[in-house]
Amino acid sequence: MRTLIAGNWKMHGLQAQLAEIAAMAQSIREQPGDVDVLVCVPATLIAGAAAAAGGLIAIGGEDCSAEEAGPFTGDIDAEMLQDAGATSVILGHSERRQGHHESDAMVAAKAKAAWQHGLATIICIGETKAQRSAGDALKVCGHQLAASLPNMPDCARTSIAYEPLWAIGSGTMPKRAEIVEVLAHVRAALEKRFGSAARSIRILYGGSVTPDNARTMVDTPHVDGVLIGGASLLAADFNAIVDVARGRTSARDA
Ligand code: PGA
């Protein structure tokens, strides 16, 4: 299984920042590797980012509507993302679950719409600090996973990103054992529900991943890749993380 290094630009980036995408693509051109590289950008940048990426790195959106084209002012559907040059989309990020009141059912409906239009999905789950302190991290993540991932997933095009809310943008990360515990729980739940097909679903860790801690992250059992916010905005940081993942095969393949 190839490691996935995915960036999430959130609400950052003007046309001028497409130079960063071009620099990320250039690094892959110079050193093609066995890593899958994806950068998810605001919808306004998808077409430009896809052009700058030149097919060397994949470009994704950060959300999509569950609906097909219609009277939904301000929304963007999966087909539009695909048409603009996206091949993936992040769904159910905690900033959307919290800031836009997205439920697990809404995330599941969005995933179906995305798969229908051939988009790969990164479905995010994660507990709050209060939930972790109460000992509920596994329960919360397990429930989110069960309810946000529809039946009959497009496994090869599905990643689950475990992003504890308190680790996002905070510079604080869970202990390695805490990450392993949640990811093992996710892996077991996926295999119980979908059988051996679930083996092609990737599990990512996200939250305060930087070039400094990337090595530890990709070497953590059950980690098939990472989802990176702040450290994906500059090619220098992002490329350093991609470099860490080169030549690595998931522990599951060993
Ligand atoms: P961060 O964000 O890397 O800046 O912590 C991760 C995310 O929200 O996906």
Image (cartoon, grey):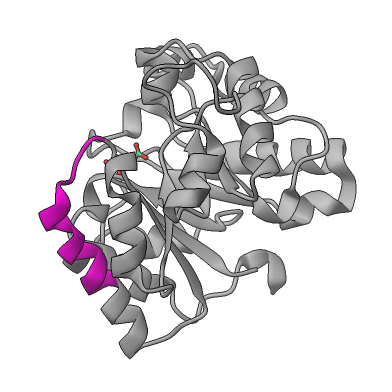
Q: Is residue 240 visible?
A: no
Residue at point 36% right, 70% down? Answer: 242
Q: Which residue lies furthest to the front in this view?
A: 70
Q: In the rendering, at what x and y percent does residue 26 appear? A: 27, 80
Give ligand 1's quarter of the image: top left
Q: In the rendering, at what x and y percent does residue 120 appear? A: 59, 50
Please identify the dominant SS of the magenta region: helix
Residue at point 37% right, 74% down? Answer: 54
Q: Of 237 and 83, which appears nearest the observer?
A: 83
Location of residue 110 (image quadrant): top right
Location of residue 223 (image quadrant): bottom right
What is the tally of numbered marks visible in this picture?
A: 0
- Image quadrant in which the N terminus is located: bottom right
Q: Is residue 95 visible?
A: yes
Q: In the rendering, at what x and y percent does residue 39 appear? A: 37, 55
Residue 8 is left or right of residue 81, and the answer is: left
- Image quadrant in which the C terminus is located: bottom right
Name above or below for residue 177 compared with residue 143: below
Residue 163 is left or right of residue 190, and the answer is: left
Residue at point 54% right, 21% down? Answer: 70
Residue 184 is left or right of residue 51, and the answer is: right
Residue at point 28% right, 49% down? Answer: 45
Q: Which residue lies furthest to the bottom in this view?
A: 30
Q: Of 207 and 103, which appears nearest the observer?
A: 103
Q: In the rendering, at what x and y percent does residue 230 appear? A: 22, 46
* Residue 67 painted magenta: no
Span of residues in magenta: 11-24
Q: Which residue lies furthest to the right in this view?
A: 195
Residue 111 is left or right of residue 198, and the answer is: left
Name above or below for residue 77 compared with residue 49: above
